[in-house]
Image (spheres, rainbow, N blue to C red):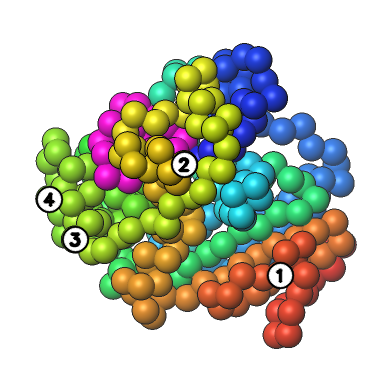
Amino acid sequence: MLLAVAAQAQSSSSGTSASSAFCDRTQQLTAGQQDRSLQFAAVVRAELNALGDSSALISRSGLDLSRFQLRYSHAAVSWRDDQGAWSARQLYYACSEEGPRIYDQGIPGFVTGIDDTSLAYVSIVSLPASEANSLRRAVLDTPVVQHLLAVNYSANAYPFSTRYQNCNQWVMEMLAVAWGGLADADDLRTQAQHWLQEANYAPEPVDVGSHAVMFASMFVPLVHLGDHPEEDRRAMKLKVSLPSTVEAFVRQRVPDSERIEVCHDERQIVVHRGWTPVADGCKPGEGDRVLAFD
């Protein structure tokens, strides 16, 4: 979700209306849009099935973050149950409860959360068996999951403060617990953030580029600046956990991990493999698999 909440707020006179547009939302899809979404979800699910893994990382495009040169906004941990079905376990902000919650969602539901029904992207990062199995164990450990859930949500949460949390930061802290062998405790978030720092997790700063976006934190409930270092606020460059920073960390930490990007426009689905992003506009390149919509 990140700073798109603040960007949206620039054209809104109400903090409540600006924030409510970004949490536990549902879209009214036309029959054609729903059909495309389900076909797209089926391809994503088939790619997960082909991995043979017990868990993977999955991210989707969602809110328009193009002004920040970002394609993906929301990351989750995808896990396979004993019957072989995949779900995405994720943090989301529940408007009705005014707080963050952990939510399991099937792949079709996860894909439907993409705002743009005419141009959508999903990224899958597969992991070697050891890392995938340890991540699955951690993400299904209820006490661990709850101890990693912050009380307060911020779309642009600073990665090394326990004051707030966003969806992607929850994934990063889950990776720390899984791969750092951290013991469950009341201070698990502190332990996880310390492990991430020791493991050289260092998100590239997001260039906010506008004082208006920074000042939006004064009236948008889901955006906060108090957890960010003063020098970052002055420079308008905020360090935030994003799907791109999650994937960069995993690629560096687990060199044997692999990436699959699945996207669609209004005519076709493209399956692209490798760490180089698929071309903007979901334009297929050499070696990409292309499937026309029925």
Asked whether the viewer can see residue 271, the reply is: yes
Going from N to C along the chain, the mark reached first, 1 or 2, is 2
The residue located at (42%, 66%) in the rendering is 248
| 6 relative to 280 in the view: left or right | left
Q: Which residues are magenta?
A: 148-166
Residue 270 located left or right of residue 228: right
Check contact, mark 1 vs mark 2: CB within 8 A.
no
Mark 3: few, some, or many residues within 10 Å (few <14, many ≥20)? Answer: few
Queried whether the magenta region covers residue 206, the answer comes back as: no
- Whole-number angstrom distance, CA of label 3 to CA of label 1: 34 Å
Disc 4 to disc 3, C-alpha distance:
17 Å
1 or 2: mark nearer the eye: 2
Q: What residue did someone put label 4 on?
A: 183
Query: Which label's residue is closer to the chain start, 4 or 2?
Result: 4
Q: Which residue corresponds to mark 3?
A: 198
Q: Residue 23: name its quadrant.
A: top right
Residue 279: mark in rendering: 1
As helix, strand or loop, the secondary structure at mark 2 comes to loop
What residue type is disc 4 on?
Ala
User: Disc 2 marks which residue?
Assistant: 236
N-terminal of the two: label 4 or label 3?
Answer: 4
Mark 2 and mark 3 in contact? Answer it, CB < 8 Å: no
Real-space Cα separation, disc 2 to disc 3, in angstroms: 26 Å
10 Å crowding of disc 2: few (<14), some (14-19), many (20+): some
